[in-house]
Image: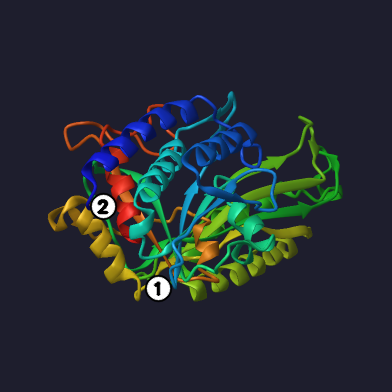
Amino acid sequence: MNGTISLRRAVEQAEGWVKALHDMPEHSFCEQKTTAFIRTVCQELGVETIDSGLETGVLAWLGNDCAETIALRADIDAVTFDDGPHHRCGHDYHTASLLGAMAYLKDHQQELRYNVAFIFQCAEENTSGAKALVEHGLWERFPQRPSAIFGIHNRPELPVGVIGVHQGALMAEKTDFRVVFHGQQGHSSTPEKCIDPILPAAQFALELSNLVSHETSPFDTAVCSVYSFHSGTEDNAAPLHATLTGTIRTLRHGTHQHLKERLSDLAQAMALAHRCTVEELSWMHDVPLLDNSAALYPRAYAAAAAAVGEEHVTDVAPCLGGEDFAVYLQDVPGFFFWVGSGKGSDTPVHPWHSDDFSVADGYLKVAISLLANLIL
């Protein structure tokens, strides 16, 4: 990358921005302060902002009358905990990195090979922001529709200075579910007069793991599990309802659809066996498979190699986390990178959402360089 001085200046600016962003964590769809901060930085840099149709998040445009437009995306919300939101997933660093890339690219506007559509996306943590933007006409809001989109996420398991570049499935297709079993209330002394929904619900939770072990290939990758179970308030009576929530995550769409069908069958079978009914079976927070474009792989690899050197570019295994960047890939080819944020092999890895999560020094320089190289 040319322009070492302006890159250093962009990194220094981003270091200040990340500190400010870290101190204003906000819930998904509630990122008003963060949105105002991003707009102010765009204004100071002389970069045009565009109405997104949503109350939070920012779209921006940097053009050079190029024939093609590339979109760059960062997420801006924080993780929700019992004591409030905290930046324990690194979205503050993602936002600062994209602002830093914007500052650098603005300095090199006459050298741009592509127009740039910047997407500072709200509500990634609840995997709803990308869908909301697309539903509000995201692609038509820019002066030119992007032909590709790129995004980054920090990765504590990779040391700073390493970039993970993987072609194909990188993150899971995810669907959360809610199942409500309906029974008949009654006193525990007369079980024959009750229909206890706890029994089918508990059996459903136990049998669910068998859907992966017996309904999918051992060479496939899938998770199907319950993560909450609520029923009853009395010590001596059968409840009316038992409610479970859980998740299905896969790396193949066909496997995902099969597990959804079999989960529905299992719920109905358990209810029938225990004289209950399934009052509700609902699917929530669908996120598509994040499938990195094969056509964009050479460009992605070249940008990463230019940022850190080929010896520090590595392939990475897919993970079963969900990422709503995948929503954009339903409309536009795209590629998502892991950017190393760990401190190295001698330091314990503190994963996303951990109380001890942190991003190591040097991350911003790598991330900004990577994003800018995708354009230059």
Residue at the image position 57 percent from the left and 35 percent from the top: 34
Q: Residue furthest left?
A: 311
Q: Secondary structure at mark 2?
A: strand
Which amino acid, by three-letter code, is at mark 1? Ser
The quadrant where residue 115 appears: bottom left
Residue 314 visible here: yes
Q: Secondary structure at mark 1?
A: loop
Residue 188 visible here: no
Looking at the image, residue 27 lies above or below residue 245: above
Residue at the image position 20 percent from the left and 58 percent from the top: 305
Could you give the CA–CA distance between mark 2 and mark 1, rounded to whole angstroms?
A: 31 Å
Residue marked by disc 1: 217
Q: Where is residue 330 shown, x and y percent of the image?
A: 54, 70
Residue at the image position 29 percent from the left and 49 percent from the top: 369
Residue at the image position 63 percent from the left and 57 percent from the top: 133
Is 157 on the left or on the right of 22, as rendered? left
Mark seen at residue 143: none
- Judge depth for marks 2 and 1 and give the one in front: 2
Q: Where is residue 306 shown, x and y percent of the image?
A: 21, 56
Looking at the image, residue 16 lies above or below residue 143: above
Is 136 on the left or on the right of 233, as rendered? left
Mark seen at residue 163: 2
Q: Where is residue 8 shown, x and y percent of the image?
A: 26, 37
- Is residue 94 or residue 208 the one in the foreground? 94
Which amino acid, by three-letter code, is at mark 2? Ile
Looking at the image, residue 233 lies above or below residue 322: above
